[in-house]
Image (tube, grey):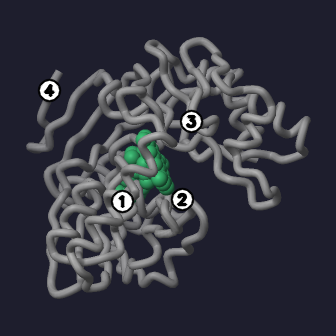
Amino acid sequence: MICSQNEIKYYKDFQLTNFNTLKINSCAKLFYMPDNYGEMISLFKRFKKDTPIVIGAGSNVLFSSLGVDKPIIYTGRLDDIKCSNNIIEVEAGYRTQALSKFALSKKLSGFEFLIGIPAFLGGAVYMNAGAHKQSISDKIVSAKVYDYEENKILTLKKDKLNFSYRHSILSEKPYILLSAKFELEKANYDDIKARMDENLIFRKNRQPNLSLPNAGSVFKNPSNCELSAGALIDKCGFRGYSFGDCQVWENHCNFIINKGNATSVDYTNLIFEIYSKVKEEYNVELSPEIIFIGKKTKDEKEKWKILKS
Ligand SMILES: Cc1cc2nc3c(=O)[nH]c(=O)nc-3n(C[C@H](O)[C@H](O)[C@H](O)COP(=O)(O)OP(=O)(O)OC[C@H]3O[C@@H](n4cnc5c(N)ncnc54)[C@H](O)[C@@H]3O)c2cc1C
């Protein structure tokens, strides 16, 4: 049901299936789609005690099959972009694949890796998304964030953003990314395009496309092991293995696909089984990349406590 509260459009009991690339059926009690940052900030003020959850393209989240009680704010309408010489300033809801193409159109290099990542900028900064030896942290100059505890907008330079592998300050502090500024390099159009095409070809056989619903890499690559997460999972015999409607992808074991009606319980059980077996066989504790959002069953609570420890 579409509603309007002080002009901000929102939905009650909103189905999230088309707002996560894993296509988990989940329901948000309240789902907001602000048109600008003023609206988003006013929602944080309104729901002070029940802090809203901000989402981008939902390409790295596992929504609970029991639903989400906290208000969800979808950032897809916050998508302004400006370019001056080699500087791009872009809002949190801008699609990363479109950003890669935008940079190409300006003959700017540095975003070629984003062509295969189905995210929004906010999620990409939160996760410090990366691929093909490039990452979002490489070219960032500063980020504008909203501190919802202090009710302040801050501009943080790159060295204050605490970037590391699949990590940024956004997961440490009560910060919401509003926009970010990047300094790219002038380059030849054909060279940039060739790198983007190469990246897409590389992905074609190594990653499921979204016709097989998935949420990208399941686990981070471990820092204390020569083998990648995918290789460890494969060596433990999980290639093609299913739990309910979740299946380890046949072509690359660090992806799990939803065969139809997967639930967060299926996904949690499958990744916990993988985590336990890899720990037992290789003494490596894999850490999930995916972020769980919503209410957990008792069993999910226990398993995620171990997975995130
Ligand atoms: C087919 C496929 C391929 C992928 N390939 C890659 C890859 O090559 N490299 C890679 O790194 N990842 C990859 N991913 C994973 C995913 O795309 C990234 O992790 C991406 O950065 C998530 O962005 P999102 O907009 O979808 O974020 P979401 O999944 O919507 O959210 C992720 C987290 O970010 C938070 N968040 C979102 N927006 C904001 C904001 N504005 N402010 C603060 N917090 C925010 C959310 O609350 C959540 O905790 C892939 C995923 C898929 C499905």
Q: Name the residue that disc number 2 marks.
A: 171
Residue 51 appearing in the image: no
Q: How many marks?
A: 4
**Mark 3 vs 2, N-terminal side:** 2
Q: Is mark 3 within 8 Å of ligand 1?
A: yes
Tell me the amino acid under the disc marked 3: Phe
Q: Nearer the viewer, residue 253 or 50?
A: 253
Query: Foreground mark, 4 or 3?
Result: 3
Q: Name the residue that disc number 3 marks.
A: 255
Q: Where is residue 57, by image quadrant?
A: top left
In the rendered view, does 206 fall on the left or right side of 187? right
Residue 258 appearing in the image: yes
Q: CA distance from mark 2 to mark 4?
A: 31 Å
- Point out the image quarter for the N terminus: top left
- Callouts 2 and 4 close, C-beta under 8 Å: no
Q: Name the residue that disc number 4 marks.
A: 2
Q: CA distance from mark 3 to mark 1?
A: 19 Å
Q: Is mark 2 within 8 Å of ligand 1?
A: yes
**Mark 4 vs 3, N-terminal side:** 4
Q: Nearer the viewer, residue 101 or 178?
A: 101
| 299 shown above or below 114 | above
Mark 4, Cα crowd under 10 Å, few <14 / some 14-19 / many 20+, is: few
Tell me the amino acid under the disc marked 2: Ser
Tell me the amino acid under the disc marked 4: Ile
Q: CA distance from mark 3 to mark 2?
A: 23 Å
Q: Residue at the spot x=50%, y=17% of the render?
A: 262
Q: Residue at the spot x=40%, y=67% of the render?
A: 147
**Mark 3 vs 1, N-terminal side:** 1
Q: Where's residue 149, x and y in %?
A: 44, 62
